[in-house]
Image (cartoon, helix red, strand yellow):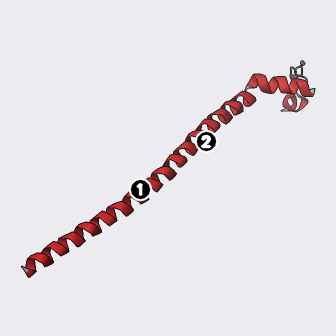
Amino acid sequence: MRITTKIVATLVLIVGGLLLVRIIMSSAFSVDGIALGSINTRIAQLSKENMLLKERLYTASAYGTVAHDATNLGYVEQKSQISLSGASPLAIKQ
């Protein structure tokens, strides 16, 4: 009878220990889940902000935008072109 009592007591202690471990692990995972959700939300926000910044960069660097800004700043496109139509004296002497 004494061996049966020891076995039952040992089993009760093992089950109690396993339940305690399960409670601790569940608590740790629930906290990790909350932190993970917060991190995922932040990643989504940063991805959206990154997309908007890329769009602004592409718009600002477009040729039309750069040309418009240059005109507003006073830069004027040069209309005359320089061309060399005659032979240079150095080329004639050779």
Q: Nearer the viewer, residue 46 or 55?
A: 46
Kind of residue sitting beneath label 2? Leu
Image position, residue 87 (x, y; %):
86, 24
Residue designated by label 2: 46
The N terminus - image quarter: bottom left
Separation (CA) of disc 1 from disc 2: 25 Å
| Residue positioned most to the right | 74
Image position, residue 76 (x, y; %):
91, 23
Residue at 75% from the left image edge and 25% from the top image edge:
63
Image position, residue 62 (x, y; %):
73, 26
Question: Vertically, is 19 above or below 67?
Answer: below
Kind of residue sitting beneath label 1? Phe
The disc at residue 44 is none
The C terminus - image quarter: top right
Q: Nearer the viewer, residue 71 or 22?
A: 22
Tell me which label, 1 or 2, sits earlier in the chain: 1
